[in-house]
Every structure is written in structure tokens, then in C-alpha cells.
Amino acid sequence: MIRVALDAMGGDLGPRIAFDGAVEILSRHKDVVITVYHSPHSGLDLPEPHNRLSLIACSDVIDGDEEIVLSLFRRRNSTLYQSLNALVTRSSDVVVTLGNTGAMVALARHLLGVLRPKLYPALIRELYSNPLRCLVDLGANVHCPPSMLVGFAELGAAYIEALSNETPKVGLLNVGVESSKGSAVIRETDRLLASKVWPTYLGYAEGTELFDGEKNVIVCDGMVGNAVLKASEGLLSFMMNKFKQAEGVSSLFETFYQTERRHGACLVGVRGNLVKGHGRSDLPAMVGAIEYGIDIARANLYSAIETRLCNEALESGD
């Protein structure tokens, strides 16, 4: 059985989305059990009893706009803390949350630990799944020195290997492909990646290569990655609305959105499987985020990534 810990309190649309999403998932997947961490003060009716659904009431909720301060680590009865702690106690295989990204990353590092010293966790988003192509980082880290960006490349490459049969080919997002382009940080990252045997590095990637071309791991800092992701989502939404009256075009965009892209991002680099869904997720997106979590739990993603990184360290003598 795949055991999902679901933080119900993070989304903009409230816990009803999580409740309904959990019920829908249980109807689709007979080998999944879900534990929902929620606030008893939400005022909503709870789902009907189900033998594969558990509800745990928590007295605290971490809001989406809260700052990351030391007191966060003492809020042990918050829904986010309790759901992550289920990974620590091995009562869950994956956590899914729509909540505060910064709090999730900070608590995950604190409770679970990182896969390797000085390797910073990163958020990966699949741009599409067939063939698999991903963007890393999406906002877990904003100020990124070259060593951190190299780590993102390794995490992205290990992710590709764990979830597909493809060879990871890394590109570093830049303002151009010429060697003279980019900041000092980008140029030093380029030098470091070019000196590595693994992963395969194909040089700079321009924005036009996000969705096309050889490179299937696109690396950038979290601020750039988040801006790229939000701009892409905004463009897709704009085009879907723009062509809503054109039946064929509208259905094409909707099909792409539902089948070619997973809902949510995966936090990699910590000792546990985590999916961060979009705060504005509706029911289909909530269901998609949970199914993404089920997929990475089946693959035991974090363990596969850890094994790949350890093997690489041994082979390179690091």
C-alpha cells in the first residue's frame, strides 16, 4: 500500500479541496491509504468514513504568508509539521501539501535532513512527461552560488534517471548561448559543470529551449525558475481563455494541461518524498498533485536519488 500524508490546510480554496481530492483518489487507487491533517476549526463537514482514510485534527496551521523564523520549528502540532513528521516516523511514504513553500522547505530540511552535506534541496517541475523534461529550481532557493547550481544539475539528472529510461542532458539557463554571456555566477557554474563526467552537460540553454531541444534538465536559480514557471502558467491560462470560443483549439490546450504536465512540484534533496501543489489548485489539480505523489512514492524517488548521488561520489572519488 502507498501511504499518503495530506496537509489539508495550505490551499487558497480551503480544506474542502483536500477532502474531496482524497475521496476521489481512494476511488481511483485501491492500493492507496491517505491520512489527512486538518484543522477542526475549519467549519466544514468531514468526509464520510472510509477504511483507507484517516483524519487527524491539528490545533495549528501555518499560513501561506508567514515568515520563516525559529519559532516555526516549535510548532509541532501544525498540519504541515505533523504531515512531514509522518515521513520521519515512517508512517507515510509521501507528503502532499499546497501550503507555504518556504515553511515546507525549512521544515523538511529540519525534520528529514539533506541527502548530502552542502547539497541544497530544490523544487523540480516537470515541463512535460513524455519525454521527461524538468526545470530546477522553482523557488526553494533564491541566492544561489555556483556550487548550489551544480547540485541542482545533479538532482535534476538523478530525477530523470529515477523516473524514466532517458539519459539526462543538462542545460544552464542563460541570456544566450555564447560563452561571454551571463553573470559571473553563471559563467563559473558553466565551467564547473563542463568539468564533470556526470551528468552530461550541453552548455547554456536559452528560454526557447525550455520546451524543445535536446536538454531535458534546465537549471536556474529559484527566482528565475519561479518567474519562468508562473509566466508559462499565465500564458497557458491566457491562451486557454482567449481561444475558449474556438472549440478545437480550446480542447487542445485543455488536453495538454491535463495530460502532459503533472500538477505540482517535487522537492528533492531531502530524505523523503514531497510534492508541493500550487496554492490556487482546484479539485483536478489537487487530484493531480496527489497522483504525482503516489508516482514518486512507488518509485521511492528520494532513495533512488540518494543511491545515484552516492554512487557518483564513489566513482568520482569525492
Image: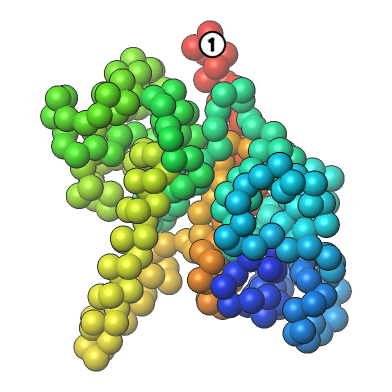
Q: Residue at x 29, y 28 (%)?
A: 186
Q: Quadrant of the N terminus?
A: bottom right
The reply, left or right, for residue 130 in relation to residue 84 is left
Q: Is residue 232 above or below residue 192?
A: below
Q: Position of residue 288 (x, y in %)?
A: 54, 67
- Is residue 91 something one can see in this rendering? yes
The reply, left or right, for residue 121 in relation to residue 227 is right
Q: Residue at x 64, y 76 (%)?
A: 14
Displayed quadrant of residue 253: bottom left
Label 1 sits on a secondary structure element that is: loop
Q: Position of residue 77 (x, y in %)?
A: 83, 57
Q: Is residue 152 above or below residue 74?
A: above
* Amino acid type for the residue under numbered disc 1: Asp
Q: Residue at x 56, y 37 (%)?
A: 121
Given residues 311 and 95, the one toward you in this image is: 95
Q: Quadrant of the C terminus?
A: top right
Q: Position of residue 282 (x, y in %)?
A: 53, 77
Q: Is residue 232 above or below residue 187?
A: below
Q: Residue at x 57, y 53 (%)?
A: 101
Given residues 16 and 124, the one toward you in this image is: 16
Residue indicated by mark 1: 318
Q: Position of residue 164 (x, y in %)?
A: 47, 45
Given residues 245 and 31, the one toward you in this image is: 245
Displayed quadrant of residue 113: top right
- Is residue 271 something one can see in this rendering? no
